[in-house]
Image: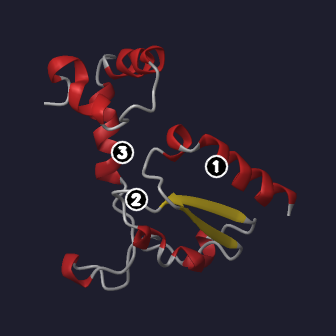
Amino acid sequence: MLSRDDFASMASWFGDVLTGEDLAVYKDAWRQPRALTGMLNWYRAADAGPPDPERGRPEGNFSCGVPPESLAVPVETLVVWGNESLAPLSLVDGLAAYVSKLSVVTVPGAGHWLPERQPAELNRLIREFLSS
């Protein structure tokens, strides 16, 4: 249960990145009615991804049946990914079919919580991207 022991399991996901004050803000948000359900449902509903024949999606399902041109993102787009994230980088496979000006940058030593773990590097990458 995610809320057990004052959200100890969830708090451990952040390691030592958050201050006690920051963690208290997260815990207050997690305590809100149906907050955990909403968070989990986001992951349940976010089943978009690359081709995966083992799950019956030989073509992938980024579009959910909508033609790629209907979902086109015509602006330059930056995806920054921590190379130690539990979410595999392969999740962006096929994204270029919808985002023609896609840049994917991986950050060594960073995981899923990239803004909390490597804020200076993330800011540098975003600034570099915006100035190019």
Residue 39 lies in what quarter of the image?
top left
The numbered mark, 1 or 2, whose residue comes first in the sequence reads 2
Vertical arrangement, residue 130 with respect to residue 30, above or below: below
* 56 vs 115, nearest the viewer: 115
Distance from the alpha carbon under mark 2 to that under mark 3? 22 Å
Q: Secondary structure at mark 3?
A: helix
Residue at 77%, 59% (x, y): give it: 129
Vertical arrangement, residue 55 with respect to residue 33, above or below: below
Vertical arrangement, residue 73 with respect to residue 57, above or below: above
* Dot 1 amino acid type: Leu
Do labels 1 and 2 touch, CB within 8 Å? no
- Mark drawn on residue 106: none
- Mark drawn on residue 42: 3
Judged from this view, the residue extending furthest toward the right is 131
Residue at 45%, 62% (x, y): give it: 83
* Dot 3 amino acid type: Trp
How many marks do you count on the picture?
3
Distance from the alpha carbon under mark 1 to that under mark 3? 24 Å
Residue at 30%, 42% (x, y): give it: 41
Q: Position of residue 131 (x, y in %)?
A: 86, 57
- To which residue does mark 1 refer? 122
Tell which tag, 2 or 3, sits nearer the viewer: 2
Vertical arrangement, residue 77 with respect to residue 2, above or below: below
- To which residue does mark 2 refer? 84
* Dot 2 amino acid type: Glu
**Dot 2, crowdedness within 10 Å: few (<14), some or many (≥20)?**
some
Q: Position of residue 46 (x, y in %)?
A: 37, 55
User: In the rendered image, which quarter contains the C terminus?
Assistant: bottom right
The numbered mark, 2 or 3, whose residue comes first in the sequence reads 3
